[in-house]
Image (cartoon, rainbow, N blue to C red):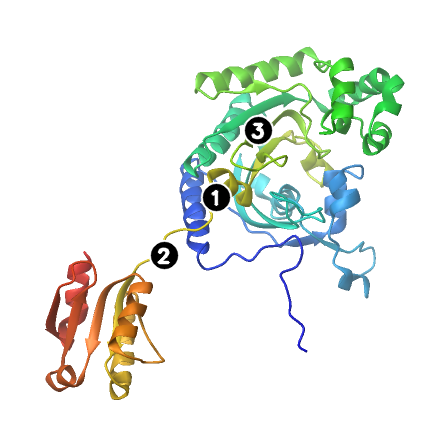
């Protein structure tokens, strides 16, 4: 018996009924992104695995548990090559491209966006897939550390979600401070949590040694209780606190509602200063984050940027599948067809095919039944195709070089000359 194949675990087919919904979402997003002066960048779906290990951090869950390495690359690795991995997120690849293509020497601020699939070796569940899709932005440039840029990026993420149908959302923000702050806070957290390590989950007990910040973000109740009882606001420098206050003031000035989440740290090592997360209802369950981001000023130097340049960078990513779940959208109305050509008998098939081709060349949409059939069955197919007009070719029409044009909405039928059909269709559709 022939084996039946299924879609790989943790992935989904996007079927024809749903594709128009995705196209509409992408079109709306592109329009908004371009209104903020962001330009699209497209990077490969896989990169040098060390790019992710260096940027995301050797202690992050993404690197330790979720990277999907390309096994075929192990067969003949090049000298010094650790291998390739499918991209788990977009920031590292965009920064790599930014530096490799010397964008820092071409413009003061590069405002970039991307759309496409990302890959992680997750345990599949609702709202969490191994192949998922994101809309992301990155704003990178020398001397681009401004609280107003932070506010712009956060406002853009909210604008996108609102336009894409996600209205029941919560914006949570926090600050991790500078690179120096993070080193100080890391030691401070270990000291505060030292006597409670045995009360942490197995993962957080390991994180206590490797990346203590991640303990703050754990979703398990036992860890949340420990953190809530021992840790409040992070002890940041006066400068970092002033910067965060400026970000908050800028958001208030433009009417963006938010809440301070002192335990929000995000899961990637490159974040500094502002971090944020947007959660939503709509049946997402425990995986309720539809987007997140933050500032990552030091990453550009980590990946080879000029040490003498004071780079600033901030970005976010929104999950497309989660947006669709949160907005309650799964399929869209069937797109309409301009004309459906019906051949009344087999001898009219060639003329019907020629007419379909003529209409398509004129920039209109058209189709026909290649299997033929009765007029009733073909009219049923025209209805199913959501066709605005049906064009019927029979013996009488062929003899007179005419076609019966039926308005499928009004139910009105008329006889028109074949040579005039394109002009008549365009006029009626307009």
User: In which quadrant will I find the N terminus?
Assistant: bottom right
Circle 3 or circle 1, nearest the eye: 1
Left or right of residue 268: residue 378: left
Mark 3 = which residue? Answer: 144
Q: Nearer the viewer, residue 366 or 268?
A: 366
Mark sitting earlier along the chain (3/2): 3
Q: Of tags 1 and 2, which is closer to the observer? A: 2
Kind of element beneath mark 1: strand
Quadrant assignment, res 426: bottom left
Q: Earlier in the sequence, mark 1 or mark 2?
A: 1
Report the disc number at residue 39: 1
* Distance from Cα at disc 3 to Cα at disc 2: 45 Å
Q: Which image quarter holds the C terminus?
A: bottom left
Q: Which residue is mark 2?
A: 334
Residue at 53% across, 20% down: 258
Q: CA distance from mark 1 to mark 2?
A: 31 Å
Seen from the viewer's position, the closer of residues 351 and 266 is: 351
Q: Disc 1 vs disc 2: Cβ atoms closer than 8 Å?
A: no
Is residue 17 depicted above or below 103 in this figure?
A: below
Q: Is residue 156 left or right of residue 100?
A: left
Residue 230 sits in quarter: top right
């Amino acid at each position: 018996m022939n084996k039946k194949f299924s879609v790989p675990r943790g992935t989904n087919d996007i079927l024809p009924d749903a594709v128009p919904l995705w196209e509409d979402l992408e079109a709306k997003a592109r329009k908004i992104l371009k209104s903020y002066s962001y330009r699209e960048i497209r990077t490969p779906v896989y990169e040098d695995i060390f790019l992710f290990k260096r940027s995301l951090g050797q202690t992050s869950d993404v690197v330790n548990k979720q990277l999907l390495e390309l096994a075929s690359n192990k067969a003949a690795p090049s000298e010094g090559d650790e291998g390739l991995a499918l991209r788990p997120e977009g920031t590292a690849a965009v920064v790599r491209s930014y530096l490799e293509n010397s964008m820092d020497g071409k413009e003061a601020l590069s405002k970039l966006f991307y759309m496409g699939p990302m890959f992680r070796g997750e345990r599949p569940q609702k709202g969490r897939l191994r192949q998922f899709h994101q809309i992301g932005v990155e704003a990178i440039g020398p001397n681009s550390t401004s609280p107003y840029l932070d506010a712009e990026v956060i406002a853009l993420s909210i604008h996108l979600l609102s336009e894409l149908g996600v209205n029941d959302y919560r914006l949570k923000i926090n600050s991790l401070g500078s690179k120096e702050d993070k080193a100080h806070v890391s030691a401070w957290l270990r000291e505060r949590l030292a006597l409670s390590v045995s009360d942490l989950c197995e993962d957080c007990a390991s994180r206590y040694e490797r990346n203590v910040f991640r303990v703050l973000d754990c979703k398990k109740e036992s860890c949340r209780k420990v953190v809530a009882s021992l840790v409040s606001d992070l002890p940041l420098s006066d400068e970092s606190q002033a910067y965060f206050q400026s970000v908050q003031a800028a958001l208030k000035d433009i009417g963006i509602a938010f809440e301070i989440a002192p335990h929000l740290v995000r899961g990637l090592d490159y974040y500094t200063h502002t971090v944020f997360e947007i959660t939503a209802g709509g049946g997402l369950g425990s995986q309720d984050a539809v987007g997140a981001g933050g500032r990552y000023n030091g990453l550009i130097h980590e990946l080879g940027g000029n040490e003498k340049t004071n780079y600033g960078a901030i970005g976010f990513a929104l999950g497309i599948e989660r947006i669709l779940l949160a907005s309650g959208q799964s399929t869209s109305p069937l797109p309409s067809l301009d004309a459906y050509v019906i051949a009344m008998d087999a001898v009219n098939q060639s003329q019907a095919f020629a007419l379909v081709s003529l209409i398509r060349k004129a920039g209109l949409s058209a189709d026909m039944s290649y299997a033929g059939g009765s007029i009733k069955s073909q009219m049923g197919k025209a209805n199913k195709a959501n066709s605005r007009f049906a064009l019927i070719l029979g013996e009488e029409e062929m003899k007179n070089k005419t076609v019966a044009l039926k308005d499928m909405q009004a139910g009105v039928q008329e006889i028109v000359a074949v040579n005039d059909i394109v002009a008549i269709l365009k006029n009626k559709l307009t």
